[in-house]
Image: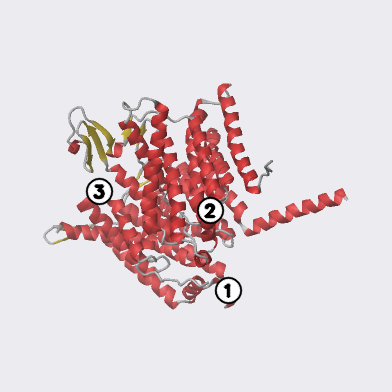
Amino acid sequence: MSFISYLINGISLGSVYAIIALGYTMVYGIAKMLNFAHGDVIMVGGFTIFFAVSMQGLPTFAGVLLAVVLCTLLGITIEYIAYRPLRQAASSLAVLITAIGVSYFLQNIALLIFGANTKAFTSVVTIPAVKLANDQIIISGETIVTIISCIIIMIGLSLFINRTKAGQAMLAVSEDKGAAQLMGINVNGTISLTFAIGSALAAIAGMLLCSAYPSLTPYTGSMPGIKAFVAAVFGGIGSIPGALIGGIVLGIIEILGKAYISSQMADAIVFMVLIVVLLVKPTGILGRKIQEKV
Amino acid sequence: MKKFKLGKNMKDNIITYGIVIIAYVIMQILVSTGHVSSLMQGLLVPLCVYVILAVSLNLTVGILGELSLGHAGFMCVGAFAGAFFSKCMKNVITFGLLRFVLAILIGALAAGIIGFLIGMPVLRLRGDYLAIVTLAFGEIIKNVINVLYIGKDSRGLHFSTKDSLSLGLEPEGDVIINGAQGITGTPKDSTFTIGVILIILTLIIVLNLIHSRDGRAIMSIRDNLIAAESIGINITKYKLMAFSISAALAGVAGVLYSHNLNSLMATPKNFGYNMSIMILVFVVLGGIGNIRGSIISAVVLTLLPELLRGLSNYRMLIYSIVLIVMMLFNWSPKLIDLRKRYSLKRLLKRTREVQ
C-alpha cells in the first residue's frame, strides 16, 4: 500500500515538474534558448502569493491571480530587455549567460526584499485529504489540486496550440522563423506570448510547489527549475507531451528513489536515468531526430 | 646562426604569460609592503583556482565548441582525490612540496580518467543535450562523494556508503572521507606562488595544444564537424582528448582548492552546478575561445563582489546587473553595430584632422 502512496506522491511532484518543464520546452522550441531564469520566476510567483495572502491578508484567489499577472509581465519584460537584443547574436551561449544573469538578479532582488531566512508558506489549498482503503492511502488536498491543475493545463495548452491562430503561429515560428515572418506572422509578438504563457505557468507551479513543500527562500526555484529542465530534456525538449511524460517519470523516480534506495542519492538516481535515456535516445523520449545536412 | 623570429602566436602567448607574471610580481610587492588586506590575501589562492578552471573550461567550450555544465564535478574529483592522498600520506611523506606535487598529479589523473570515462559515451550527444548530461554528471559526482565513507587502519582501506561506523575500523583507525562531512585536516599546502606556477603550467599546456596539429584538428571539429570528419579527422579521439585534458586541469584546480581549506565538503555551493555556471560565465564574458580573456574575466569577476563589499547586500545585485549589461554590450548585434559606427566616425575624424 505504501507503494501506491509513493506513486501518487511521485505523480504529484511530477505534475509540478511537468508544468515547469512546459515553460522550458515552449521557450526552447521557439526561441532556441535555455531560459535559466525560469526557475526563479517560480520563486517570484511563490513570494507574490506569500506577500499577498500571508502578509496582506488578501483572499487566496486574488493572491494567485496577482502572482500569475505579475509573473506574466515579468516574463515579457525579461524577454524584451535581456533576451530580444541577443536573438541574432553570433553565439547562442551569450543569451544563456544573460539568462543566468537574470536568474541571479531575481534571486538577489528577492533576497533584498524578503531576506535570506526561510519563510513558512501557508498552503493555499483548502480541500481536505482523501482517505482510501481503510486510511492506508491518504491523498492530500495539495496532491489532488496539483494533478488536476496539470491535467487542465495540458488539455488547455494543446487545444490552444492546435486550435487557435496564435498557437499555430507558435508552431510556425518554432519550425522556421524566417518563413513564418514571410507568412505575415509577428515573430516578436509570438515569442513574447510564449514567454508570457511560460511565466504564467511558472506562477502556478510556484503556488503548487510551495503548497506541497511549504518553505520559501530566494533559492526555492533553482533546484526544481533544474529538475524540470532535466524533465524537459528527458521527454524531448521542444515537445509538449514530452514535457508531461518527462516530468511525471522524473517525479516518480525521485520519490521512489528517495523511499526505497537512498534519500541522499535520489537526485543522483534521477540524473543517472536521464543519462541512460539520452544515451539510448539522444534527443529524449519524444524528441525528433533532425538530420544534419551538409 | 639560426634566425630567431617570433611568430604571431608566440608573441600572443608571451603577452599572456607576461600578464600573469607581472600581475604576480605586483601582487607580491603589494603583499610584502602590506598594502593588501588579509581578506584579499585569502582570495589569492581561490583566484588562481578560478583562473585555472576558466582556462580549462575554455578548452572545452571555446576550442572544442561543446557546452559543458559539469566542470565543477571534475574539480570535485580532483579536490577529493588530492586531499585523500595528502591525508593518507601526511605521516609518510613529510616534505610538503613533494607531497603536494604528487597530490596534484593524482588529482589531475583522477579527474582526467573520470573525464575520459564520462566523455566516451557523452560526447556523442550534441549542443544542449551534452550540456544537460554534463550537468547531470556533475551533480552525480557531488552526490556520490556525499555518501562515500573511506577509512584507513592497519588492515588497509575500508569503504562504505552508509556511515562511518559501518566501516568497521580498528580503534586506532582513521576516517578519511566522512560522507557529507567530507575530508577534514588536509594539510594546507596551497600558496599563491604555487597557484601562479600552476596557472602558468595550465597556460603552457592549453596554449601549446591550441597551436599544435592536434589543436587545429580540435578546432576544425568545432568549426565544422562534417567537414572535419570528411578529411579524415578522428572526431572521437580529438573530442575525448580536449575533454579529458580539460577535466584533468579542472582536477588540478580542485587539488589547489582543497589544500587551501581545513575541511573539504562537497556542497552545492562549491561543487554544484552553480559553480559550473560561474566558471562558464568567466569563459563567456572573457570571450569564448580567448584564453587571455578567460584569465582577465576570472580575476575581475572574482574580485568584483569583494570590491563591492562596501555595498553589502546590493553587491550581488550589482554583479548580476553588470553581467547582463556586459553580455548585451558585448553580444547584441545592434549594440555591436553602434559601437562600430561610433569608433569608425572617430577614426574618420582623426584621419581628417591629420590631413
Question: x, y percentage for residue B123?
Answer: 42, 58
Q: Is residue A258 visible?
A: yes
User: Quick one: SS at disc 2?
Assistant: helix
| Three-letter amino acid code at the position of disc 2 | Gly
Can residue A59 be spotted in the picture? no
**Amino acid at dot 1:** Gln
Per the model, the C-alpha gap separating discs 2 and 1 is 41 Å
Residue B307 sits in which quadrant?
top right
For residue A147, which numbered disc appears in the image?
Answer: none
- Asked if the residue under mark 3 is in contact with the one under mark 2, i.e. CB atoms within 8 Å, the reply is no
In the image, which is nearer the foreground, mark 2 or mark 3? 2
Q: Earlier in the sequence, mark 3 or mark 1?
A: 1
Return the mark for residue A181. 1
Marks 3 and 1 belong to one chain: yes
Mark 2 and mark 1, same subunit? no
Identify the residue under disc 3: A263
- Residue under mark 3: which chain is it in? A
A113 up-or-down from A292: above or below: above
Residue underneath mark 2: B215
Q: CA distance from mark 2 to mark 3?
A: 44 Å
Looking at the picture, tell me which residue is in the foreground, A87 or B235. Answer: B235
Q: Are discs 2 and 3 both within one chain?
A: no
Q: Disc 3 marks which amino acid?
A: Ser
Front one among B338 and B181: B181
Disc 2 chain ID = B
Badge 2: how crowded within 10 Å, few (<14), some, or many (20+)? many
- Report helix, strand or loop for mark 1: helix
| B325 in relation to B299, above or below | below
Task: Determine the residue located farthest toward the top in the rendered image.
Answer: B33
- Say which of marks 2 and 1 sits in front: 2
